[in-house]
Each structure stands twice: as C-alpha cells, then as structure tokens.
Amino acid sequence: MKNITVIGSGTMGNGIAHTFAQFGFNVNLVDINEQALQKAMATITKNLDRQVSKGVLTEEAKQSTLKNITTFTDLTAGAAQSDLVVEAASENLEVKLKIFKQLDGICQPETILASNTSSISITQIAAVTNRADKVIGMHFMNPVPVMKLVEVIKGYNTSASVLQTIMELSQKLGKIPVEVNDYPGFVANKILMPMINEAIITLYEGVAGVQEIDTVMKLGMAHPMGPLQLADFIGLDVCLNILRVLQDGFGNPKYAPCPLLVNMVTAGHLGAKSGKGFYDYSGGGKDLVVANQFKK
C-alpha cells in the first residue's frame, strides 16, 4: 500500500494527509474548493516548520513530505488509482453516503475505503457500496500528526484481512491502533461527548462558570484541557452532531444535547474555528478569555 487519497482538506483531512506524507506515502489531497486546498497546504507547511523547529524533523524531511502531497479538486482524478481512500469530509451522514457511493464507482475493486467519522455507523456507510468488506473506520485524533490513537472501527461486514491491514498500516504511521466495534460514538465519543454535554449542562444550570468547570477537571481529574475548552477545540457543531447521533442510535435521553449547546451552534458560536465559543479566540487564542456571555 503506497498511494493514499484523503478527501477533505479541513483540520482532520490536512492532518491525515500530513501524517501519511511524512511517513513516505504518496498522498492525493482532494477538496472541491481550491482555496481550501491552498489553506490546507499552508497549514501543513506551518505544522512541518513547527516540527523542524522542535527537532522532530529535518528540513530535508519537511521538503520530502511536501513533495509527497498532490492536491486535486476532481474526485475521479484524485482517487482512481489509490490503494486506500480516507474520507475526512463533514460529519454529516448524507455527505458521507454520497462520497462513498461515488468512490465505489471510481476506485479499483481492491481499494480499501475508510472513513475518519467520529460517530457515524461504518456499516451504514458501507451499505451504499458494493465492497462492504473493504469499508472500515479510521478515527484519527486531533492534531493528527501528534496524537497517537487511531480508533479502527470494524463494520458488520468488514473483512478480517482488511481490519488487519489497517491495524498494521496505522502502526507504520507511528500510531497505536485500537480495534472497536461499530456502535454509535464508538469508544472515544460514547464516553467523551456525554462528559462534555454534562459540563455544558453544569454551566447552563449555573453550578459554576466556564473557567471554574474547566479548572476542576484539569486540576482534580488531571485532564490536560477542560471539557469546555476541549468542546471549543473540537467544534461545538461537531459536538452537537455527535450527541444527536448518540441520541438517535441508542434512543436514550441521557444523550440529549444541552439547550445551551444548541443555541450556541444556532448562533454560529462554534468554538475556536469561528472565533468564539465558551472562550473568545479573537486574540488568536493565546490568552484564553471567557466569552462575554459567560462572564459573571
């Protein structure tokens, strides 16, 4: 396996492309938006520069990594000859189903199709293809070049050989793969999202403020980042989507998103990527300032 296609050039997509390219794979990065691709390459270059400054990479390795990435706005041109396609598009079921249906008609019969979904059923995604045995989940963590974990999600029809291939491939990327069965939220988000939601409910009910909640979890539970800051980092819209997947998938009211989260997403306060969430990032996020609406 040498030729990799990554679909989607956002935070996760460019991180996945960066990681594969750094480990010597030929990467086609695909996005329908040329400006998004240019932004992604600028981000990858910036992150590589950071690795060079920290002594993680040499300048030669940085240049080699960049040469390993080719950008495309055409899905057929970018995916037709790949050994593995990793989809990292929007966390939206309809979007993913459309992409996988297209990929099934574009890619070679032996090509493995993976999704970086953080919550959506791999079995459901695989059902729109004629290669359900070759569809699998590769849930990378953000930031991808740094975080070691890959949740490898086995759909109902994913073959044992494909599972083994992806487990071994993840290790070649310097990652630690963990096999997980296909249920809503998998492991990471089935545990994480209810905790984040409960932190938002705690704020909503007036038990404590933003910084107080995050400080309790950082100092009391040894979390490197408080749940509200983490929600901002993930994206409040993504958190909301995942909670709705959990609620629909399990039919349990404990996964119902807090009304405060719903309102914030509706208002466009999505966290770090929009400039405001529980914290205000207008200053670049270097000095965390609680957003105005949460100040006591």
Image (cartoon, rainbow, N blue to C red):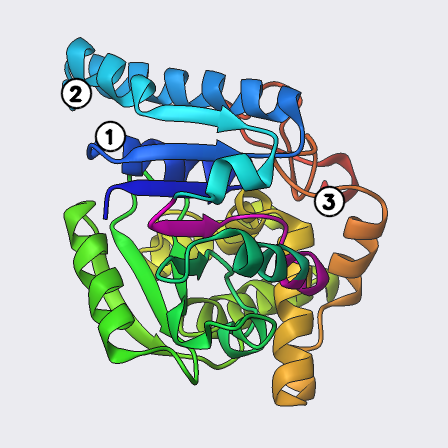
Helix, strand or loop for disc 1: helix
144 relative to 214, above or below: above
- Checking the image for residue 57, the label placed there is 2
Q: CA distance from mark 2 to mark 3?
A: 41 Å
Residue at left offset 42%, top offset 47%: 225
Q: Tell which circle, 2 or 1, labels the residue nearer the N-terminal end.
A: 1
> On residue 22, which mark appears?
1
Q: Position of residue 77 (x, y in %)?
A: 53, 35
Pick the front one: 194 or 144: 144
Say the numbered circle drawn on residue 294. 3
Q: Nearer the viewer, residue 186 or 82?
A: 82
The reply to whether the C-beta atoms of the residues labelled 1 and 3 are less than 8 Å apart is no
- Which of the two labelled residues, at mark 2 and mark 3, occupies the earlier sequence position? 2
Image: 244 above or below 296: below
Check the image and name the residue furthest to the top: 59
How far apart marks 1 and 3 lie (CA) works out to 41 Å
In the depicted structure, whether residue 232 falls above or below residue 250: above
Q: Which amino acid type is shown beneath numbered disc 2?
A: Leu
Q: Position of residue 157 (x, y in %)?
A: 41, 83
Q: Which residues are magenta?
A: 82-97
The structure residue drawn at horizontal position 30% and vertical position 46%, both measured from the top left corner, is: 147
Can residue 92 be found in the magenta stretch? yes
Give the distance between the C-alpha atoms of the residues marked 2 and 1, in whole angstroms. 9 Å
Q: Amino acid at mark 3?
A: Phe
Regarding mark 2 in the picture, which secondary structure is present there?
Answer: loop
Question: Are the residues at dot 2 and dot 3 in contact (C-beta closer than 8 Å)?
Answer: no
Please, what is the three-letter code of the amino acid marked with disc 1? Gln
Mark 2–mark 1 CB contact (< 8 Å)? yes
Q: Secondary structure at mark 3?
A: helix
Label 2 or label 1, whichever lies nearer to me, is 1
Crowd around label 2: few <14 · some 14–19 · many ≥20 (10 Å): some
